[in-house]
Amino acid sequence: MKRIFTQRRKDAKKNAKADSKKDLHFFASSFAPLRLCVKLRLCVKCLLLLFALGACTSKPSGPLAFVTNERDGTITVIDTKTDQVYSTIKVGGRLRGIRLSPDKKRIWVAISYPTNQTENEDTIAELDLNGNIITKYASGTDPENFVIDDNATRLYIANEDAGTASITDVKANRVINTMPVGLEPEGAAISPDGRWVYITSETSSSVSVIDTQSGQVVKQFLVGARPREAAFTADSARAYVTAENGNVVSVVDTRDHSVIKTIELPRGEASSQLKPKGVVVSPDGKRVYVATGRGNSVAVIDGEQLTLLTLIPVGQRPWGIALTPDGRKLYTANGVSNDVTVIDTTTNKVVATVKAGDGPWGIAI
């Protein structure tokens, strides 16, 4: 009997150990999915952290497009490779004309204020690519547009309210000459060879030609009603001037600064004018692209035959317009729809629309 009870106690212990192992295995298997979930959550958090860090330190993959937003005082920066907003630069004031320095490392922007109560409040500001103001340069009142020479030594500024064009010595940071031009000068363009600056004046429907060697106006000529902007071909032999109320583009021979042809643009809905404003020429000179403002489109002109090829619908009220250096993409700043339209110039099709700030005005790439 004693042997039987001893054996039963041994069996009971053995069964208890087995049951304990089963319970442990059950609990372990029950918590396995929980451990897996915890591991997955940790992995996801790590990936998100790495992604966030990468986004913060990522560099643009293509040339940058800088878009001034007139009503909120910001500059929208777009990576032209991805057509995504890379950053937003807060400047303040009314931002309109914008240019890049020859080395593409600095931004130049025209800033004006409605009151202009402070002396020298209206200015041309030089910024680094992060939006830090390096220097403010003297200008006339209410500067709208300007150009800078290839050596970044001279600024040529159209001062709308004053009815003048001014030349600023960048190194000395002072205005070295101010000259009367037409009424309400708005546009400014410099020939690629650096010899000529064209100032377009709205009310007088004229273009003033500044000889950069003498720093003086050497000629004025008439174009269509309310000229807004001008653009030169790469060889500086020809210029195109848009006329907003005339609904035309004037073709200019720069040898004697004479209009050799006037290209009439079609009318829009209810026979309304297209209101051409911004203009840019392809690197090979074979295409001229015109932002039509209230026409909400881009007019494509054959640069050899000087005829209209097509109209490309874009956002509302495109004014600023620019090409990538290779000429493959075209960007328009749409001031009413608050966005930027991207066009593939090989197909003349819109490939992207990028949200900008309030009142996109000018664009530089």
Image: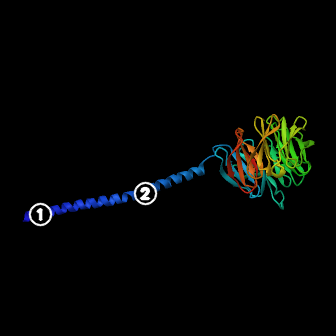
Q: Position of residue 291 (x, y in %)?
A: 78, 47
- Give the vertical position of 286 relative to 199 (above or below): above
Task: Check disc 1 and give the amino acid type.
Answer: Thr
Image position, residue 191 (x, y; %): 82, 39
Q: Residues within 10 Å of mark 1 (few under 14, many from 20)?
A: few
Name the one closer to the observer, 209 or 317: 317
What residue is drawn where x is 59% and y is 51%? 55
Tag 2 or tag 1, which sits nearer the N-term?
A: 1
Q: Quadrant of the C terminus?
A: top right
Quick check: marks 1 and 2 in contact, CB under 8 Å? no
Q: Secondary structure at mark 2?
A: helix
Q: Is residue 56 above or below residue 153?
A: below
Above or below, 328 against 117 in this view is above
| One can see residue 98 in this view | no
Residue 215 drawn above or below residue 163: above
Task: Please give the residue where the numbered disc 1 appears in the rendered image.
Answer: 6
Q: Which quadrant holds residue 221? A: top right
Q: Quadrant of residue 254?
A: top right
Q: Is residue 144 visible?
A: yes
Question: What numbered label is drawn on residue 185?
Answer: none
Answer left or right for 87 relative to 172.
left
Query: Which residue corresponds to the image point at 84% horizontal and 39% vertical from the top-left?
Result: 239
- Camera-nearest residue between 186 and 50: 186
The residue that label 2 is drawn on is: 37
Callout 1 secondary element? helix
- Quadrant, the N terminus: bottom left
Q: Nearer the viewer, mark 1 or mark 2?
A: 2
Say which amino acid is labelled 2.
Answer: Cys
Residue at 83 percent across and 61 percent down: it is: 115
